[in-house]
Image: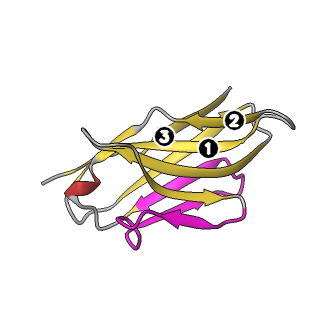
């Protein structure tokens, strides 16, 4: 099993900052990419940001310039630094990781999500 555990969600005022963390554990041979997705009530899940093992990053247009995704040296933890938060950023944020459990067994795992609420 590959498990992802998110942390760092909470309540923040508009214009404030928040940092999310996600740690992958379990049967992991290699992680090829990790990312963050979010889902607001009544809306579809959407990509927020991703990063692969080569260090390249991809951001949704709505967060580019405000959010930064990064990984630690072990390549099993991903962070999302969120600045200049807006009420529209309110959502459940989910961590995702893809890779291989072993040489022939891929995985695509999701965390349970962490609530981010931006409100006065």
Q: Residue at x 29, y 67 (%)?
A: 84
Q: In which image quadrant can residue 87 be found?
A: bottom left
Q: Residue 50: which numbered mark, if any?
A: none
Real-space Cα separation, disc 1 to disc 3, in angstroms:
12 Å
Q: What stretch of residues is rendered in magenta? A: 54-81
Which residue is found at the position 37% from the left and 65% from the top? 63
Q: Is residue 93 above or below residue 89?
A: above
| Position of the N terminus by quadrant | top right
What residue sits right under mark 2 in the picture? Answer: 107
Q: Earlier in the sequence, mark 3 or mark 2?
A: 3
* Disc 3 residue crowd, few under 14, some 14–19, many 20+, Cα 10 Å: many
Mark 3–mark 2 distance (CA, rounded to whole Å): 18 Å
Q: Residue at x 57, y 61 (%)?
A: 70
The residue indicated by pointer 1 is 97
Mark 2: secondary structure:
strand
Q: Nearer the viewer, residue 60 or 77?
A: 60
Whether residue 86 is in magenta: the answer is: no
Are circles 2 and 1 on residues that touch, CB within 8 Å? yes
Q: Check residue 77 for magenta coloring.
A: yes
Return the mark for residue 6. 3
């Amino acid at each position: 099993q590959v498990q992802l555990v998110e942390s760092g969600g909470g309540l923040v005022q508009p214009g404030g900052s928040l940092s999310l963390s996600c740690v992958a554990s379990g049967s992991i041979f290699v992680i090829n990419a990790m990312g963050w997705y979010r889902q607001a009530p009544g809306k579809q899940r959407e990509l927020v940001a991703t990063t692969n093992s080569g260090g390249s990053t991809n951001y949704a247009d709505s967060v580019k310039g405000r959010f930064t995704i990064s990984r630690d040296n072990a390549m099993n933890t991903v962070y999302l630094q969120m600045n200049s938060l807006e009420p529209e950023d309110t959502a459940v944020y989910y961590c995702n990781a893809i890779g291989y459990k072993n040489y022939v067994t891929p995985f695509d795992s999701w965390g349970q999500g962490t609530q981010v609420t931006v409100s006065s």
